[in-house]
Amino acid sequence: MRWLVIGLVAGAVACKPGGVTTTDELCAKATVMYAKCDHEAGIHPQAWELILDRWRGLCRALITGETKQLLPDGLQIWNEMTEDVRAALRAQAECTAATTTCEQYHACAQ
């Protein structure tokens, strides 16, 4: 399934259709690295895909401030976040999107 996500990101970057924004690209790249470097063994594949999808939605909210794509529980989490937490997560998303190795990815959390 990870290769599907990687393929979608590569396709989005290569084709760059009119609907793909730089925020979409950034969040897709951050999600690929999250999937590659933070996948926990034992999580059901469908549950993992939901986690990744929710991260992409949260990432878009962090970058743009738009929350219409968040599911109710994600919106609740968003509403409970302080601006400091949002800023830290935004910086982490931007950092992880620029990484190519798990070592770099994990350094973004520091």
Image: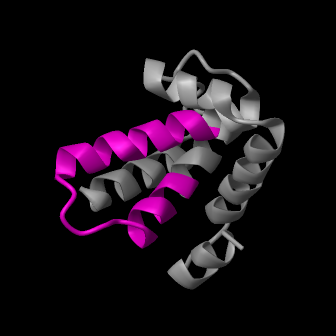
59 up-or-down from 105: above or below:
above
Instruction: Please say whether residue 71 is visible from this viewpoint.
Output: no
Dividing the picture into quarters, in which one does residue 16 lie? top right
- Measuring 68% from the left and 70% from the top, which residue is drawn there? 108
Q: Residue 55 magenta-drawn?
A: yes
Extreme bottom residue here? 103
* Quadrant occupied by the N terminus: bottom left
Q: Main secondary structure of the magenta part?
A: helix
Q: Residue 56 magenta-drawn?
A: yes
Residue 67 image position (x, y, % from top left): 62, 20
- Measuring 17% from the left and 52% from the top, which residue is drawn there? 44
Would residue 14 appear left or right of 38 to someone viewing this image?
right
- Measuring 44% from the left and 72% from the top, which residue is drawn there? 37
Dividing the picture into quarters, in which one does residue 17 lie? top right
* Quadrant occupied by the C terminus: bottom right
The mark total stands at 0
Instruction: Please say whether residue 103 is visible from this viewpoint.
Output: yes
Residue 51 image position (x, y, % from top left): 37, 45
- Measuring 18% from the left and 64% from the top, which residue is drawn there? 42
Q: Which of these two is toward me, 84 or 55?
A: 84
4 up-or-down from 77: above or below:
below
Would residue 98 appear left or right of 47 to someone viewing this image?
right
Region of the chain picked out in magenta, as a range: 30-59
Would residue 45 appear left or right of 87 to someone viewing this image?
left
102 up-or-down from 7: above or below:
below
